[in-house]
């Protein structure tokens, strides 16, 4: 068999080289999807000024993304388990390219909503397929990359967009042109890859809205739910109303203020993921919960005293909780699924995450015109602190079951269709 010489090290077989290349493409795609999702954040104030939009309408634009993403997860979240990873990833990239074209063409809020709607569908379709594809290609490194890539993508999208808005020409279009070029390159790279994942029958049945959680993963998923809700509720607030709050606290109208706010939260989260990557999942969850509670408390002090440095310092500490909480939750549940169950379990995982990201932020947007941004942020922060404390308590009181636990399947009825919570599987971890 031919090998590829890697210099002084041992030669790498072509098959292994292709797997590494595919892993890199999937990781970059995961980052790019998240960067595209956070890129509009620094632009919200520009849209708001040009089109005279209310905070409630702006958070609704953000929520449309979360709702459409949730709809995609519920319907096509496990599609790659049946069609294979490559076809779903390519389709998602194509749909994301369409959404970027809609952003470029947007002349009013309704076009913006349409762009966010398509973007949510594309991201929802890609999320589980990319995460499961990474796990197929490298089960050992996948949990780390699945935790780091989305957070780094969010940070890069927010700060990069803010910099282009502040210093580049044509602020409402330049960032989307950059994203469009990156997405086209990724589409070409993904098209050249060998198929990942094995196709299997049952694709039409898989489109029925379901959440499939294997028996051994049920208790762990319930245990990490408060942490998931806390970190993504915080992320949703900062990605929708963060620029407005930062401008109020600092008195600055620069687009970079909103970008730095999102960057402080997400980049410190990415650093936390890297630093804690070898720490036990339960310990990571505890560290994340403590950091989340402490960071939000400090940020609220900065918000209500008008102290910009306390606000940003608290945001950075809360970001540690954001990253550690997400990583700890991911590492607690991801190893509990077999290969053919990964996309379904990850879909359930992200359903919890994106419900938490969308619903509370819309409620906050509705409250801002009546209560003001600082009062709304204080109430919101208190909710996040309560969830963080609940998650901290849960890390000591809840003990996850292992794969040998035999739990009977549970079926719920929702919207006239059965919601399958999963069936037990057996085997060793």
Image: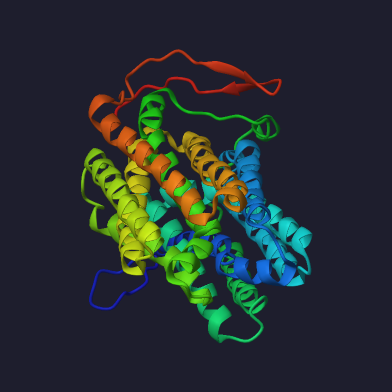
For the C terminus, the image quarter is top left
Where is the N terminus found, in terms of image quarters? Answer: bottom left
> Which residue does the image show at 49% across and 60% down from the upper left?
242
Q: Position of residue 301 (x, y in %)?
A: 33, 56
Please indicate, yes or no, whether residue 135 appears anywhere in the rendered image: yes
Determine the residue positioned at 51% across, 35% down: 348
User: Residue 231, relative to residue 309: is it above or below?
Assistant: above
Report whether residue 87 is seen. no
Q: Residue at x 54, y 73 (%)?
A: 161
Q: Quadrant of residue 7?
A: bottom left
Q: Which x, y percent locates residue 197?
A: 52, 46
Q: Nearer the viewer, residue 10 or 226?
A: 226
> Which one is in front, 251 or 292?
251
Left or right position of 285 against 150: left
- Give the color scheme: rainbow, by chain, secondary structure or one colour: rainbow
Asked whether, in this view, residue 398 is left or right of residue 346, the answer is left
In the picture provided, is 132 more to the left or to the right than 112? Answer: left
Compared to residue 185, the image places residue 403 above or below, namely above
The x and y percentages for residue 64 are 66, 49
Q: What number of labels is visible?
A: 0
| Corner quadrant of residue 49 | bottom right
Q: Position of residue 365 (x, y in %)?
A: 59, 50
């Amino acid at each position: 068999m031919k090998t590829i010489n890697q210099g002084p090290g041992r030669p790498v077989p072509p098959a292994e080289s292709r797997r590494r290349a595919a892993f890199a493409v999937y990781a970059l795609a995961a980052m790019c999807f998240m960067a595209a999702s956070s890129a509009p954040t620094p632009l919200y104030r520009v849209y708001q000024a040009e089109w005279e939009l209310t905070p409630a309408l702006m958070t609704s634009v953000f929520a449309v993304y979360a709702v459409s993403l949730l709809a995609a997860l519920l319907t096509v979240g496990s599609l790659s388990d049946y069609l294979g990873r490559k076809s779903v990833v390519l389709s998602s990239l194509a749909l994301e390219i369409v959404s970027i074209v809609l952003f470029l063409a947007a002349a009013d809020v309704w076009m913006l909503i349409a762009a966010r709607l398509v973007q949510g569908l594309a991201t929802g379709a890609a999320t589980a397929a990319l995460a499961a594809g990474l796990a197929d290609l490298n089960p050992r490194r996948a949990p780390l990359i699945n935790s780091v890539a989305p957070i780094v993508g969010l940070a890069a999208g927010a700060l990069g967009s803010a910099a282009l808005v502040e210093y580049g020409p044509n602020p409402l279009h330049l960032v989307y042109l950059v994203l469009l070029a990156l997405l086209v390159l990724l589409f070409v790279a993904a098209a050249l890859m060998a198929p990942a994942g094995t196709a299997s029958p049952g694709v039409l049945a898989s489109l029925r809205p379901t959440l499939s959680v294997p028996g051994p993963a049920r208790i762990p998923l319930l245990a990490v739910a408060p942490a998931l809700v806390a970190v993504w509720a915080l992320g949703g607030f900062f990605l929708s109303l963060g620029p407005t709050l930062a401008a109020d606290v600092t008195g600055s109208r620069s687009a970079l203020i909103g970008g730095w706010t999102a960057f402080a939260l997400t980049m410190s989260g990415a650093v936390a993921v890297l630093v804690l990557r070898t720490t036990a999942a339960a310990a990571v969850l505890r560290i994340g919960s403590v950091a989340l509670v402490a960071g939000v408390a400090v940020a609220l002090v900065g918000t209500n005293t008008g102290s910009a440095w306390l606000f940003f310092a608290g945001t950075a500490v809360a970001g540690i909780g954001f990253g550690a909480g997400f990583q700890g939750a991911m590492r607690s549940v991801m190893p509990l699924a077999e290969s053919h169950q990964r996309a379904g379990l990850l879909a359930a995982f992200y359903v919890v995450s994106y419900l938490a990201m969308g619903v509370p932020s819309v409620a906050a947007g509705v409250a801002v015109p009546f209560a003001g941004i600082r009062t709304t942020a204080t109430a919101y922060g208190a909710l996040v602190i309560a969830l963080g404390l609940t998650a901290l308590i849960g890390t000591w009181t809840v003990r996850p079951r292992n794969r040998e636990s035999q739990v009977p399947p549970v079926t719920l009825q929702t919207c006239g269709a059965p919601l399958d919570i999963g069936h037990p599987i057996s085997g060793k971890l």
